[in-house]
Image (tube, rainbow, N blue to C red):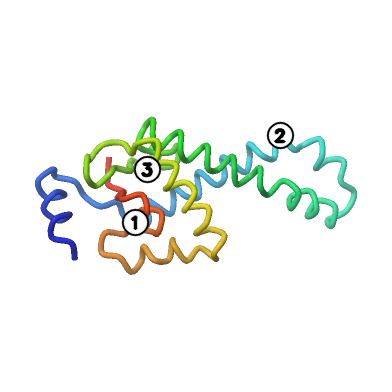
Amino acid sequence: MNEQLDDVLDREYLQIASLKARSAAFAIDEILISILLFIVLWDNISAAKTVEAIIELTNHFLLEFMAIKIVYQTFFTMQYGATLGKIAMKIRVIEVKTLSNPSFFSAFNRAVFRVVSEALLYLGFIWAFLDPYRRSWHDFTAKTVVVNA
């Protein structure tokens, strides 16, 4: 356990967000981004004749999908301290040092390592189950923690 982090959380009356709330926020964000990509690619998807063609299409736009996720996560985390999913679940991301919304660099770092963690079989997310502060890899690299709003 990190006594300094415990002291800060206690002093500021902050409570670590539950894994249930974080998981629900993750699902909401993924659905929103997927719907957006589906709308953008609708013409291409409807023109695909086979399942293989649809798979090829999604593989072709994988980098764009990752870029959209990074921009979405960075913007909302930096601007509001939470993505739309986190806002819906009433949780937010704060920098440990400042207890405020993450800076651009911290939010960008967090977004990039979130995508990396997804690419590595979600191992960074699983890490949150083992951490007493429920921090995933992207929280560690960005020096952030997710708390109840």
- Which residue was labeled with disc 3? 106
* Spot occupied by residue 5 in the image (x, y as percentages of width and height): 17, 54
Quadrant of the rendered image containing residue 42: top right
Task: Answer yes or no: is residue 53 visible.
Answer: yes
Q: Which structural element holds mark 2?
A: helix
* Spot occupied by residue 54 in the image (x, y as percentages of width and height): 80, 51
Cα–Cα span, label 2 and label 1: 33 Å
- The disc label shown at residue 78, or none: none
Cα–Cα span, label 1 and label 3: 11 Å
Quadrant (top left, top right, bottom left, bottom right) of the C terminus: top left
Mark sitting earlier along the chain (1/3): 3
Q: Residue at x 87, y 41 (%)?
A: 47
- Which amino acid, mark 1? Phe
- Which amino acid, mark 2? Val
Q: Residue at x 64, y 44 (%)?
A: 65
Q: In the image shown, does 99 or 54 lie closer to the viewer?
A: 99
Q: Which structural element holds mark 3?
A: helix
Mark sitting earlier along the chain (2/1): 2
Sort mark 2 into few (<14), some (14-19) or many (20+) by Cα contacts within 10 Å.
few
- Disc nearest the viewer among 3 and 2: 3
Quadrant (top left, top right, bottom left, bottom right) of the N terminus: bottom left
Q: Is residue 120 left or right of residue 93?
A: right
* Spot occupied by residue 145 in the image (x, y as percentages of width and height): 29, 50
Which residue lies most toward the front here?
A: 105
Asked if 7 appears above or below 32 in the picture, the reply is below
Mark sitting earlier along the chain (3/2): 2
- Which residue was labeled with disc 1? 140
- The disc label shown at residue 40, or none: 2
Q: Which structural element holds mark 1?
A: helix
